[in-house]
Amino acid sequence: MERSSASMWRKLNSRYNLVGTECENCKSLYFPSRIVCKNCGRQTKMRNKTFAGTGEIYSFTKIHVPAEAFREDAPYTVAVIKLDEGPMVEGHIVESGKEVKIGTRVRQVFRKMLVEEDEGLIHYHFKFEPV
Amino acid sequence: MAGIIGYGVHVPHYRIKVEEIARIWNEDPESIKKGLHIKEKSVPSHDEDAATIAVEAARRAVKHAGVKATDIGAIYVGSESHPYAVKPTATIVSQAISAGHNLTAADLEFACKAGTAGMQMLMGMSDSGMIKYGMTIGSDTSQGRPGDALEYTASAGGAAFIIGKEKSESVATILDTVSFTSDTPDFWRREGADFPSHGGRFTGEPAYFRHVTTATKMLLEKTGFKPSDFKYAVFHQPNGKFPIAAAKLLGFSQEQIDDGLLTPIIGNTYSGASLLGLAAVLDKASPGDKVLVTSFGSGAGSDSFAIEVNDIINEKRTRSEKVLDIINNGKLYIDYAMYLKNRKGIRK
């Protein structure tokens, strides 16, 4: 995750609210956003699409040896979520007392993803909670 | 007249019991449970703070209110645990609920009553026509020094209320409000300090009780209502004992305060406490019921409100989860070591 104010600012919509894109031509949905539709090429007519943030776990793994930025969080679970609208999204899973398994229903929640050391920024991001 | 268009709350899943904290400090859990009238408290996850709690509550409030987030013209977040000293939590909330940019926003601090101070500000702004809707939030991940009495109660949670003028949209009308404020050094935290300090027993009579009872009496005198006119009453709840004593002093019954008394099961959510109690009461109230709410913030001050529930509450109630469901679903009990880790008391 980039530690710069500008790159963080550009990605707030996608990180806070799961804003991706939809091709108005063929109705294909993308997350993260794409500029050019895979199907329509030069005929692409993209617009922003806010996903509802609900879906199910398609696959998951538990991270025991984390990247340096997440050393305090380990072990933690990362999953591929199949959103109800179709796209697959990678996300951290937060504890809710519900079992984490393939097919578990999840909802988007708002959490801290990364806290820069000392005097830096706090990066907020969507995560997913089993429901 | 300004009213509550919708509301939402958030309480973290983690809980620690009084017995577990008492075990560490070799204290008698039964005397603490009896003395503070508390069983357990909520604890934020390592990735939760006052901003994430505010956002979760705000999103539920928008859903409950059924308004467009872009129609919200002001967002105020009251907390004494804002994640940044400079960088408003309210800006994070506005982005996360997609409220757009044509709004005013600010963070408030008045110990445990900043959320109700925001409610008063929004009443004026909506009644004057300056804004269509405004959102006030009380959200905290409160701190208690290890071994201090506060450690048994200082918890995490928050509530968001959307205020507007149209009675047809209001789940409840705010009939009147008064405040009582004084310079009282009962509880404080200096800039840069990790934990608050307090005046021990001084936090009772000259602080909590003086302000809560005076503000409530002022409201009753101003409105002409008697305690028996209210179906429900919510008093700020730093522990489970103080609001019961305040209710008794003012002539309210235990039955009137039971539904809004959440501290025994989630602890003191500081800026969230009075508003969470109000939300729990509104989850049960019927059209025509009157609710009295008196907050308290150390330093010190109290805001008191007379609220009347409207017909649309029954329709809006079906739109989002109830406060008690959010509190009771998915509770995860942790020991003191995990509590310290979640609160960054120990680090790898």
Image: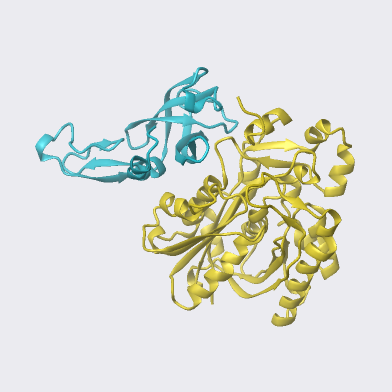
Chain colours: A cyan, B yellow
Query: Does A50 sit left or right of B9 as displayed?
Result: left
* In the foreground, A20 or B184: B184
Q: Residue B247, can we see it? A: no
Q: Residue A89, can we see it? A: yes
Residue B258 point in image, percent of width and height = 76, 56
Query: Does B244 sit left or right of A70 as displayed?
Result: right
Residue at 21 percent of width and 40 percent of height: A27
* In the foreground, B12 or B91: B91
Indicate whether B211 appears above or below A85: below
Query: Does B253 sit left or right of B347 as displayed?
Result: right
The quarter of the displayed image where residue B102 is located: bottom left
Q: Residue furthest left?
A: A42
Residue at 73 percent of width and 72 percent of height: B215
The quarter of the displayed image where residue A57 is located: top left
Total number of numbered discs in the rendering:
0
Residue B114 point in image, percent of width and height = 62, 61
* In the foreground, A102 or B263: B263
Indicate whether B222 appears above or below A120: below
Q: Quadrant of the C terminus of chain B?
A: top right
Residue A78 point in image, percent of width and height = 46, 25
Residue B68 point in image, percent of width and height = 40, 60
Q: Quadrant of the N terminus of chain B?
A: bottom right
Residue at 37 percent of width and 39 percent of height: A4
* In the foreground, B3 or B295: B295
